[in-house]
Image: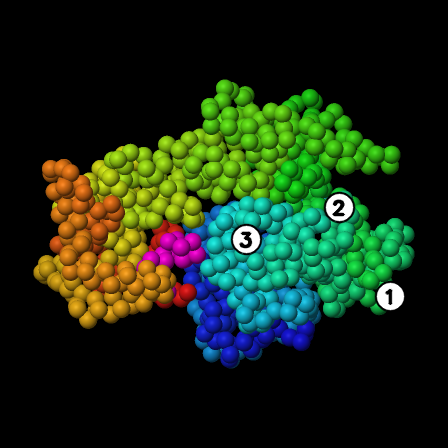
Amino acid sequence: MMHRHIYEVIKSHCERHHSKAAVLATDHSATYGEVVAMADGVAQVLSGAGLKDEQPVAVYMQRNAKLLGVLLGIMKAGGAYLPIDLQDPPDRVMTMLQIAGCNLVIGDHENCSKLPGWGECGPSPALRFLEVRHIESVPDCQDVCASGGARLAYLIFTSGSTGAPKAVEIEHRSMMNVLIAARDLLKLTENDCFLGVTTLAFDISVAELFLPLMVGGSLVLRDKTTLLDPPGMARLVRDENITVIHTGPSVWAVILEQVPDFPKIRIAISAGEAISPSISRRLSAYGDVAWNMYGPTEATVWATGQVLTAEIQTDENAASAPIGLPFAGVDVLIEDQAGKPVKDGQNGELLLGGICVARGYRGRPDLTAERFVMRGDIRFYRTGDIVRRNPDGTLEYLGRVDDQISIQGRRVEPREIEVVLERQPDISHAAATWFETETGSRAIVCAIVPKDGRTPDNANLRKNLAQVFPEAMIPAKIVLLERLPTNKNAKVDRPAIRSMASRIDDQISSAQSGQMTPTEELVSQMWKRAMRMTDVSNDANFFAIGGDSLAAVTLNLELEQKLGIQLPPQLVLETPVLQDFAGRIDEVKARKFVQSETSYIFPLHERPGSTPVFFCGVDLTMARHWTQPFSLYAIAYWAGGGNLVEIDTIEGLAARYIEGMKEFQPSGPYRMAGYSFGAILALEIAQQLRASGETVETLFLLDPFQIFHTVDANDGQVIMHGSTRPSFSTRLKKYARDSMASVRRDGLRGVLASLYKPVEKFKGGPWLAYQLHHLHARRPDLVSERFLPRSMWPVFWYAARKKAAEYTARPYTGRAVMVITPKQGGENAWQKVLGPACHVEKLQASHRSLFNADVAERWQSILGRGLSPTNEPSREISDHKE
């Protein structure tokens, strides 16, 4: 089976699982049939473009439901996919394309347009670009699939010792071997659901993306920011019934510390870096089975595995828990420095051989010959890892032969960093190595020798490095030295540099530290304690003093508890300098949800320099779940200053809210959005803004409340849509449905609530509450106070429905995007108002679930596309399935 093509294996599941969700992404879900149809469409487009055998095709796109189809389609057509991380600096991306000899890119225009040489009309002549959204699926395609076996499946980059990354070439048989071996080892079934968060540019993504589809299971596709919100991740696991999770041990450590009741899953996997025995024992309690997987990229994802148990017997000072036994098809050899095999129990370098071994490094025959060697008839890869083999065959990991390290799952070659540092005008020599942070993860420390006694500027240095490296490869600490330390062999003494990193703070800074604000002082104290430093100034950079994304999660949660506020998980990633970070915290504190009795516009998520979305009726929990690159301002019409009950008409409310909006944004272009009843308000606000000469960039409507009167665009006649009151039979069915749900949920209390409901309706509860509210506003007295409902929601409900029933919607000619759920109703009336140019998408979800984190991610993706100037509204209605 290892010689079969991965596309053929996944397509074989279509007969049984054609309509089953294969991928559950944030934009929508894709069934097995849709994944295969997308793959067939991609393969046809590539074949039509003259794709050659094993030609690399770069994949530079968002992690959405089409991703699996794109990867499979490239391989089906005979090409090899080249995964690109969207977070990689554009110059580095272009370097990788050049090294790989890749001139064909599949992706999103908004991402690809950031690359150097990409003009308004598209890429430079050296690149050909295919936009994902323009590739049509091809159902029931019978085209022949390219062969598997020794054909190239993908290229993936690792850090290189020459100052440039190197591309590892992996064949189909190697990929299929690890997938089959892992499938059998983990005993996967069609009931398993994987969480896929690893960036496409890490080879572990191969296992996350393709393993669940090997057995007819499901993949919940998210991005790595999921790991920054442990409580949100726990909810996602529960909501989607996720059974398999893979991530690094340092991430597991933070998750299990911050969420002690993290839901138990079927399989917990740690990989990417060494896992300490203590963490391995903790992890074993959170899975029916827990695994420590080991494998370099050149040996195709995973090569060995070890079951982790609470009784695991390993020295607490060991570099790692055991890495276990080799996978099927993997040969193991351990050699001494002279290249001779060692006996069991003796230390030596680990060599991995057999079908798992990569073809080599693309365009680098010298490096390939150095690292890939023949031992007898078997080809091996020299891992550079020191291990020993126990009598039972279990491998113990002891460290590295060289100083190569793994940071946040990314393998880093220190020399690549050193080469770039030594190109800087103020630096003469540099040496890079790792050090252990206070969270137990690893970060990079560099010792530098300045030129002519100069002191490099930290901000400029990090800025220059950020143009070349991803965040994980930028040094967290920099030590200034007159000369680099050396050992007795006259080589750079990297252990000595690591020792310096643990004793001293970062020695270069970018500005003079001034007097701190109270918030800056609080943050400084927390950073000092977390990093075990004696002093942290207000110009300190979180990452430059040894912080990482795991420490950011821990500190964020502690700040929220101390200050009683909610902070975005990515806040420190956006503003890593202490004074900027503290300033953002002060903004959040100043704009907490309940500012005063007259507040009704709340900045839930701020992205400095962006045009905000004013969202009528958005749930305030979106402060935590907002993922878009622009600010989110909630117009809470039910809040004290919203005057929902006091102002009689929709038009009056809109005029009131425009006044408040202009305090935040004095002039356009404006971005309007609305949910349910808030959609009607958003429509009227957009109408009034346009009538006053302002520009409304986009109107986004999320499952809007029904409108009952519209004006015909041709003759100006008022058209009535439906009834302002549901029929008796409709209300009876809804009562029965709600009552059954209430009884199932609340037992006897649900029975009593169901019996009381008709009485409440008969008495006109909402109407009475509405009238009492007005009476109380006009003449407060003890009687009206006694009967005013403690909950104002009946008042708001009645006021909203009353205003909606009296409102007449005029035709809207601007850009509009509407997302609807199956049971909300009123779609025809809205399309009369918004016209044929409105882009409509159907979301398979309930009205009340739209602010659940996973569902919110899907409609946020639609909103983001609707606000992109490259995405003109479509006249088609697309169906996004759950």
Residue drawn at (28%, 60%), measured in percent from left and top?
Answer: 753
Secondary structure category for the residue under label 1: loop
- CA gap between label 1 and label 2 equals 38 Å
Which mark is in front, 1 or 2? 2
Q: Would you place residue 229 above or below residue 711 in this image?
A: above
Q: Main secondary structure of the magenta part?
A: helix
Q: What residue did someone put label 1 on?
A: 376
Residue 445 in picture, x, y percent from top left? 68, 36
Label 2, label 3: how far apart the Cα atoms are: 25 Å
Mark seen at residue 262 = 3
Residue displayed at 58% across by 43% down: 550
Give the image location of residue 94, x and y in percent: 57, 49
Coordinates of residue 821 in the picture (x, y in percent): 32, 63
The residue segment tinted magenta is 843-861
As for residue 857 lying within the magenta part, the answer is: yes
Q: Nearer the viewer, residue 519 or 169?
A: 519
Rendered location of residue 764, percent (x, y): 15, 56
- Which structural element holds mark 3? loop
Of the residues under marks 2 and 3, which one precedes in the sequence? 3
Tell me the quarter of the image containing the C terminus. Answer: bottom left
Q: Earlier in the sequence, mark 1 or mark 3?
A: 3
| Kind of residue indicated by mark 1 | Gly
**CA distance separating discs 1 and 3:** 49 Å
211 to 495, vertically: above or below:
below
Residue type at mark 2? Glu
Based on the displayed image, in which of its 4 quarters is residue 736 positioned? bottom left
Asked which secondary structure carries label 2, the reply is loop
Check disc 2 and report the residue beneath it: 316
Query: Closer to the observer: label 1 or label 3?
Result: 3
- Disc 2 crowd rating (10 Å Cα; few below 14, some 14-19, many 20+) is few
